[in-house]
Amino acid sequence: MESPRDHIESLIEKGEQYGKTTLELIKLKSVDKGAGVLSELISWSIVIIFAVVFFTLANIALALWLGSLLQTMYLGFVIVAAFYGLLALLFLILRKPLLKKPMNNSFVKQFLD
């Protein structure tokens, strides 16, 4: 028959094991979330790089085409640059509802899922 002291020691040992297991589980979940966020970031970075190259070449082609239509090459580039200047101004004004909140929500969702 076990004494109360043996029961207490067994209980303390089991509590200690539970604490270690819980800590290990938290570490593993953190590593999993970090790896998920990092892989998502890398995959989006690759997509963004290709998109930037595509849009750069498309904009050069558009500027050259507009320049040939207007018979002044630099005017095509000025028109394309002015369009992107207006677009940048629009995004500057609307950056919080269009960019900040959705990105914030995406990061929080990524960490909590």
Image (spheres, grey):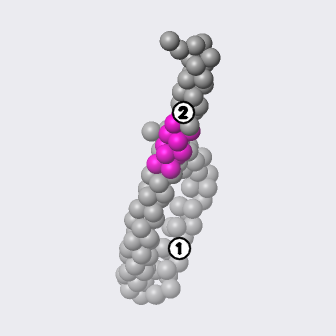
How far from the left and from the top, in percent, is residue 28? Answer: 49, 45
Q: Nearer the viewer, residue 7 or 46?
A: 7
Mark number displayed over residue 17: 2
Q: Nearer the viewer, mark 2 or mark 1?
A: 2
Instruction: State the extent of the magenta-drawn residues as a range.
Output: 21-33
Of labels 2 and 1, earlier in sequence is: 2
> How many residues crowd around disc 2 within 10 Å: few (fewer than 14), some, or many (20 or more)?
few
- In the rendered view of the protein, which quadrant contains the C terminus? top left
Q: Secondary structure at mark 1?
A: helix
Q: Quadrant of residue 50?
A: bottom left
- Circle 1: is it few (<14), some (14-19), or many (20+) Cα within 10 Å? some
Q: Calculate the distance from the C-alpha at mark 2 to the C-alpha at mark 1.
A: 64 Å
Secondary structure of the residue carrying tag 2 is: helix
Considering the whole magenta stretch, tell me its main secondary structure: helix
Front in this rendered view, residue 5 or 54: 5
Q: Residue at horizontal 51%, vertical 36%?
A: 21
Rendered position, 40 above or below 30:
below
Label drawn at residue 34: none
Give yes or no for contact between labels 2 and 1 (Cβ–Cβ under 8 Å): no
Q: Position of residue 27 (x, y in %)?
A: 54, 45
Which residue is located at x 53 percent, y 42 percent?
24
Q: Which residue is mark 1?
A: 81
Type of the residue with mark 2 = Gln
Left or right: 81 as drawn, with respect to 70: right
Q: Residue at x 51, y 67 (%)?
A: 83
Residue 15 location, x and y as percent? Answer: 57, 26
Query: Residue at left 62%, top 17%?
Result: 5
Determine if residue 59 is in view.
no
Residue 60 in sight here? yes
Question: Is 74 inside the magenta-drawn segment?
Answer: no
Residue 111: x %, y % from top left: 51, 43
Label 1 sits on what residue type? Ala
